[in-house]
Image (tube, helix red, strand yellow):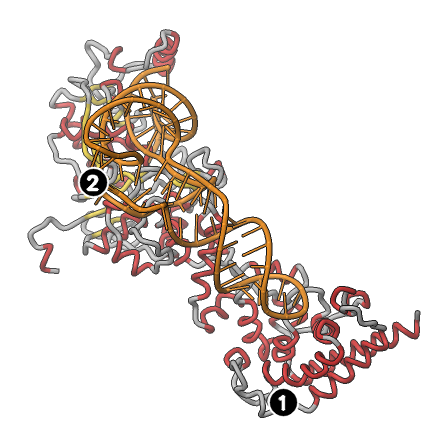
RNA sequence: GGCCCUAUCGUCUAACGGUUAGGACAUUGCCUUCUCAAGGCAGUAAUCAGAGUUCGAUUCUCUGUAGGGUCACCA
């Protein structure tokens, strides 16, 4: 608090345009600004750049706000909460732009553009034919008409020269005089262009640091010319490297599959993981750590560590990272997140409440994002936890390889299952703590005859050693799950409970015998 | 095409003139094992190219090459 007294308070802004949803590139810009602001006890402003009425998409402002909030980004002033610099919609700040535009007109640094669209187009074509860059200033009207608001207003570049400037993230940058042209300040519809509006707003809102995307580098000379014309000091530029699509060929954009940020929410990604992942495309604190919480990112963040080169958005690694964050969740948090995606068909069953905790624990190692539980369901890998499965004789009988030379008939397997049932029947019904916490290592709970993973294993083991592990454990497991692939039989038995375990083994036994008689 | 930016394993990256160029994801093999998953161990894999500066370049300079951005009454 007291160490920044001598310095000007840091003010940043995130200024999206309401032209649709928010994608990961935009979020990353907001994230860096936010990390920087919060680390330095600054102030963050949310401003909506809605000067293009054509492209505006209704509802996007609310959608953007929701997106930002989801990943944990907040702001001190904005259209939703107000503030001393209100309004925060550019469309409501037209008077300001007009005021500064008039200043420039009075100074002789801005003038009305009298050309029609067709005339402009022919100039452009001319330049193209001559293989030179089109510069409006080469066609600047000698005696422009007075600006009455019906024509576009352009900035007059008086002395186009090479421009040099410093960017906090990119270092020293420069551009030739070709980058400087008489650009439009106010459009003929009365709205300002981005180029003009953002500079006025940043001035009035006293923004000190502009975090922006890579594509603004090329228009920076124009901004600089405007700052100069207005006679004002510019904020610091912090230009972020681009995020490329998975193929690394193109800047990630909506057209190239950049998803709506909120899609990640509906797929069961954790906001912490998204933030962690995004933070590390284009920035790294150094060292070998990769998993960071929002708090850690905030503590570690420095502009100096922002990269210059672009990075790819690789969702395979995002999935890995999401799992890492899922693993950090407490059981209760995990369960809460998971249950959103469990089909109602299952969650309304009588067996659901007593088994879901255990299912959470089993599923923990297997999911990279919560919606994958639905994929499990679709594959038939979830239902058997709650409902007795149907059997397939070929699956119930394990493979030759598993038998390790031993002969096995259906009747033989039925007998083995009967023996397993007998042994398991001797165990007491579980009365202890929830199964997901009752998986003691070693012999804890193994000798007391309680129904848990360890005691189940001990009950089954002698039979498995006698008849062959492959045959017995496979047989019991499939009797419980009905599936070729599933968690091990001990976990399954523990999860579904003693009664259900015995009942399912009985069913499998009967199934084998009946099948035998029938065939 | 003009202007501009960038360049380390397939991908995300570490290194701020001296390292056997490190980690992670992915991939491959092995171990564990009743299957699947998880886990453990191991392996393959990079400084775009060419000049210079330097005792020494991934690191600094230049050229080339490649990729990207931008040249709107869009932001």
Which is more toward the observer, A442 or A320?
A442
- Camera-side residue: B50 or A390? B50
Residue A388: % across, % down: 72, 74
Where residue A306 sits in the image (x, y, percent)?
Answer: 28, 44
Q: Which chain hosts label 2?
A: A
**Residue positioned 59% across, 82% down in the render:** A454
Q: CA distance from mark 2 to mark 1?
A: 69 Å
Q: Residues within 10 Å of mark 1 (few under 14, many from 20)?
A: some
Mark 2 or 1, nearer chain start: 2
Left or right: A425 in relation to A77: right
> How dense is the environment of label 2, judged by Cα within 10 Å: few (below 14), some, or many (20 and up)?
some
Image quarter of the C terminus of chain A: bottom right
Residue ID at (10%, 57%): A3
Establish if A464 lies above or below B67: below
Q: Position of residue A98 (x, y in %)?
A: 20, 31
Q: Quick check: A92 above or below A435?
A: above
Contact, mark 2 vs mark 1 (Cβ under 8 Å): no
Quarter occupied by residue A485: bottom right
Residue A312 location in percent, x, y? 43, 41
The answer to whether one can see residue A215 in this image is yes
Indicate the quadrant where residue A226 lies: top left
Q: In screen coordinates, is A197 left or right of A57?
A: left
The residue where tag 1 is placed is A429
Q: Is residue B53 left or right of residue A245?
A: left
Q: Is residue A47 in view from this perspective? A: no
Look at mark 2 in the image and give the residue it sits on: A202
Q: From the viewer's side, name the closer residue of A494 and B9.
A: B9
Disc 1: host chain: A
């Amino acid at each position: 608090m007291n160490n920044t007294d001598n310095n000007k308070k840091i003010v940043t802004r995130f200024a999206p345009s309401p032209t649709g949803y928010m994608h990961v590139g935009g979020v990353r810009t907001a994230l860096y600004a936010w990390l920087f602001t919060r680390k330095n006890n600054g102030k963050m402003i949310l401003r909506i750049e809605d000067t293009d009425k054509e492209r505006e998409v209704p509802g996007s402002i609310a959608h953007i706000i929701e997106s930002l909030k989801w990943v944990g980004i907040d702001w001190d002033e904005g259209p939703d909460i107000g503030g001393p610099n209100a309004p925060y919609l550019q469309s409501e700040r037209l008077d300001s732009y007009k005021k500064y535009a008039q200043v420039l007109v009075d100074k002789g640094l801005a003038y009305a553009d009298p050309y029609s669209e067709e005339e402009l187009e022919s100039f452009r074509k001319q330049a193209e034919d001559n293989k030179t860059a089109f510069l409006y200033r080469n066609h600047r009207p000698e005696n422009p008409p007075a600006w009455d608001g019906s024509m576009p207003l352009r900035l007059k570049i008086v002395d186009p020269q090479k421009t040099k400037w410093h960017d906090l993230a990119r270092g020293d940058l420069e551009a030739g005089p070709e980058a400087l042209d008489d650009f439009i300040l106010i459009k003929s519809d009365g709205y300002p262009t981005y180029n003009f509006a953002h500079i006025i707003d940043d001035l009035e809102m006293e923004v000190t640091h502009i975090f922006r995307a890579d594509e603004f580098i090329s228009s920076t000379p124009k901004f600089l010319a405007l700052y100069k014309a207005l006679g004002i000091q510019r904020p610091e530029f912090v230009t972020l490297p681009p995020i490329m699509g998975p193929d690394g060929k193109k800047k990630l954009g909506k057209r190239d599959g950049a998803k709506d940020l909120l899609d990640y929410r509906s797929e069961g990604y954790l906001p912490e993981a998204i933030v962690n992942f995004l933070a590390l495309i284009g920035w790294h604190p150094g060292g070998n750590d990769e998993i960071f919480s929002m708090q850690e990112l905030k503590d570690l963040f420095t502009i100096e560590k922002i990269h210059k080169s672009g990075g790819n958005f690789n969702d395979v690694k995002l999935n890995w990272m999401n799992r890492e964050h899922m693993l950090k969740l407490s059981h209760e948090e995990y369960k809460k997140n998971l249950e959103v995606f469990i089909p109602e068909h299952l969650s309304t069953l009588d067996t659901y409440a007593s088994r879901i905790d255990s299912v959470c624990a089993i599923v923990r190692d297997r999911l990279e994002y919560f919606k994958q539980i639905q994929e499990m369901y679709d594959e038939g890998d979830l239902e058997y936890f709650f409902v007795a499965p149907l059997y397939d004789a070929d699956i119930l009988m394990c493979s030759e390889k598993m038998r390790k030379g031993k002969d096995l008939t259906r009747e033989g397997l039925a007998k083995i299952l009967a023996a397993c049932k007998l042994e398991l029947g001797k165990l007491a019904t579980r009365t202890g703590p929830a199964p997901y916490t009752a998986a003691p290592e070693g012999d804890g709970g193994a000798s007391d005859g309680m129904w848990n993973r360890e005691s189940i294993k001990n009950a089954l083991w002698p039979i498995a050693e006698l008849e062959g592990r492959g045959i017995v454990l496979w047989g019991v497991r499939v009797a419980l799950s009905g599936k070729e692939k599933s968690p091990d039989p001990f976990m399954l038995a523990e999860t579904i409970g003693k009664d259900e375990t015995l009942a399912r083994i009985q069913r499998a036994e009967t199934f084998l015998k009946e099948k035998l008689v029938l065939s």
